[in-house]
Structures are given as structure tokens and as C-alpha cells.
Amino acid sequence: MLGCLAGVAPCLHAQAQQGLTVFAAASLQTALDQVAKDWQAAGHDPLVISYGGSPILAQQIDKGAPADLFISADNDWMLWLVKRKQISTDAPVTILGNTLVLIAPNTSATAVPPVTAFVTEAADLAVLLKGSRLAMADPRSVPAGKYGKAALEHLGLWAGLSSSIAPFDNVRMALNFVARREAELGIVYSSDAVAEPRVRIIGQFAADSHPQIVYPAAVLLRSAHPEATMFLAFLSMQQAQKRFIEAGFVFLAGAPR
């Protein structure tokens, strides 16, 4: 069973004994679902994948939720689990990177033409919002939201926009909010925008406007699944690399942590 959203306890408990269980950041869903199919096609049992915001997943793992691997959308929540003795200090492997973008509904006049190649301090996002909300992952805890807040602060735009923020538990929820035209603008990863035809990228945040976006992965200390480390290695192989790049990620496996 693929694509079960984390946060629904009955779903997680029902999956406990079904196979190799991966808890993964919601932004990975499009690519990781394809990697899971490749894994199964290679002769392995189907994966059980629960997607959600990295903080929710990390907290569920700490409370004993059934999981063998964790793939976070930032280092903070991975290191939090290391400190909680759920993951070995030397276990996390940096697999992927991403870019942060500003999106609008594909049918919105805001999206044609693009506002700018890069969002700058001169960008008047309040005008572009037209009294609507700026959808993004919760900047208090969710990686995509923290990156987004850092970028807006870097540009001097946060103070004027913070009251217009519509925060969500994960970045895919923010993406869907814009796709349904319930917000004029959203801040998501480029991989999210690639996965959703109902939105268009209208600006990109420069890499130096926020901390580097990274996706570390690790096997949990309590995992006894014989294929857990094998799947972690599979995530760095050429076939998986192709899936991630097609989905809009930057492949970083083997890069220094």
C-alpha cells in the first residue's frame, strides 16, 4: 500500500506487520512511489510508505510508530531522532536536494507571464496576493515552511506577509490549496510544482536566501527488517536517481553531510 498520509493512527497500526515501512516527507511522494514500484519490480516485497510533514513523522517514530526507515526534508528532525536515540549518529545519508519556488494557480492571471526568474526584495507579493492567503508549510516546524520563512526574511518580505500566511502540516497540503485556487500564491519545492499540473512556477528563491534544502535518510535503530539497509542503498542507485531527477529533485547521494 503506497501513499498513506501520516497522522492517521489506525492506518499506521494496520500496516505494522505488512513489510518494510518507510516514513517519508510528503514532498517525496511522486518520486518515491515510482522508486517503490522499481523496488518491487526488482523482486522485493511491496513497501509500506507513510507520507507526512517531517515533524509529525519524527514525533510518531519517537512514540513507537512502526517504521524501518525515515526520510526527512531537513537535517533538524533527523538530528532530533538521533538525540532521541532512535537513529545512530553515523546513520543518516544525504540523498537529495531541492529548490524553493513561488507558485500560482495555472489559470491565474498572476501566473502569466512569470513575475521574475528570482523572487527579490522588490517583489510586491502583497499586491499579487490580491487579499488572498500565501499557502506554505507551517514555518514553525515543517522544513518547507522554515525554508520559506528564512527566504522571505532574507528578502525583507516576512514582516509584511506573515499575517497573510496559511500554514499547513506539510508542503503537499499547501500545494493542493493553491491548485484548488483557494490561495493566489504558495511557497513549495520545485518538485511539488512539477508534480501538480494545476499550478505554475512564477518565481524562484535564490539558494543563498535560505538554508540548503537536503533530504537525509536513515534506518531506525529498532528496525529488524532484513532489507532495510538494502533499500537505503537502493535510494542512491542509478534507477532511483533517474526517478528523483525526473521529479524535480537534485540528486546529492554521496555528498558530504
Image: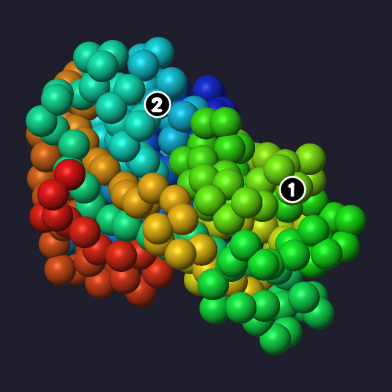
Residue in the image at 79% along x and 40% along y: 163
Q: Relative to 165, does residue 97 appear above or below in the rendering?
A: below
Amino acid type of the residue tagged 1 in the rendering: Leu
- Residue that label 1 marks: 161
Residue 67 appears in the rendering: yes
- How is the structure coloured here? rainbow
User: Looking at the figure, which quarter contains the N terminus?
Assistant: top left
Residue 172 appears in the rendering: no
Mark sitting earlier along the chain (1/2): 2
Q: Which numbered marker is on residue 58?
A: 2
- Quick one: label 2, few (<14), some, or many (20+) residues within 10 Å? many
Q: Among all residues in the image, which is located at the extreme right?
A: 131
- Quick one: label 1, few (<14), some, or many (20+) residues within 10 Å? some
Q: Looking at the image, how many numbered discs can be counted on the residues? A: 2
Question: SS of the residue at dot 1?
Answer: helix
Left or right position of 230 against 113: left
Residue in the image at 71% along x and 43% along y: 159
